[in-house]
Amino acid sequence: MKFWKVMGLGIAVVLLSGAAGMQSLRASGDAPVIKVFKSPSCGCCGKWVDQAKAAGFKVEITNTENMEVVKKQAGVPEHLQSCHTASVDGYVIEGHVPFKDIRRMLKMRPKARGLSVPGMVTGSPGMEYGNEREPFNVVLFDASGSEKIFQSYPAK
């Protein structure tokens, strides 16, 4: 009987030390950093930033009135543009991309420039107005102009 008590205590110590290790990893900064370029007056961009923080991302914000220059430098095709442009771990994030899709892309590490939700789609992160949601696609795009649907979201 003593053996099982000792084993139980040993397992608890291992589990607790593992949990403490996970906490120290989180505290030491393993959360992805999203660098967001946005207009200082854009409310929906501010909502997206707040949701990024709530989703566990660290966020660095640069307010600028020259978003056209930012998008051009980031290589975002005109038809994929939205209001804000961000970068995370070498990828471009254009517009109101859901955070679970950003995390999935970071896990997959595709050969791509990044993700986009073109336009200002009601119901996408930061663009919530009541329970409405227009259908939208998250587009994966690369430097050669290739695009594919990464994730589709139906209307509500």
Image (tube, rainbow, N blue to C red):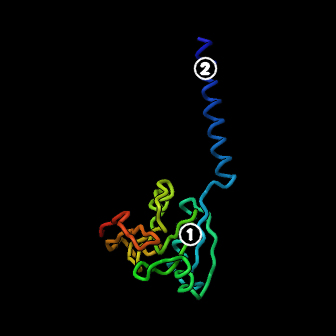
Question: Which residue is at 60% across, 26% downward?
Answer: 11
Q: Left of 29 or right of it: where is 46?
A: left
User: SS of the residue at dot 2?
Assistant: helix
Residue count near mark 2 (Cα–Cα under 10 Å), binned few <14, some 14–19, many ≥20: few
Q: Left of 117 or right of it: where is 25?
A: right
Kindly give the residue lying farthest to the left in the view shown. Answer: 155
Question: Which residue is at 41% across, 67% downward?
Answer: 140
Rendered location of residue 130, percent (x, y): 38, 73
Name the residue carrying label 1: 87
Rendered location of residue 84, percent (x, y): 52, 78
Q: Callout 2, which amino acid? A: Met
Asked if residue 2 is positioned above or below residue 21 in the image, the reply reads above
In this figure, what is the number of numbered marks?
2
Q: Nearer the viewer, residue 121 or 139?
A: 139
**Label of residue 73 in the image:** none
CA distance for labels 1 and 2? 47 Å
Q: Callout 1, which amino acid? A: Ser
Residue 39: name its quadrant: bottom right
Residue count near mark 1 (Cα–Cα under 10 Å), binned few <14, some 14–19, many ≥20: some
Rendered location of residue 154, percent (x, y): 30, 67
* Screen quadrant of the N terminus: top right
Question: Which residue is at 64% across, 18% downward?
Answer: 6
**Label of residue 7 in the image:** 2
* Screen quadrant of the C terminus: bottom left
User: SS of the residue at dot 1?
Assistant: strand
Closer to the eye: label 1 or 2:
1
Kindly give the residue lying farthest to the bottom in the view shown. Answer: 65
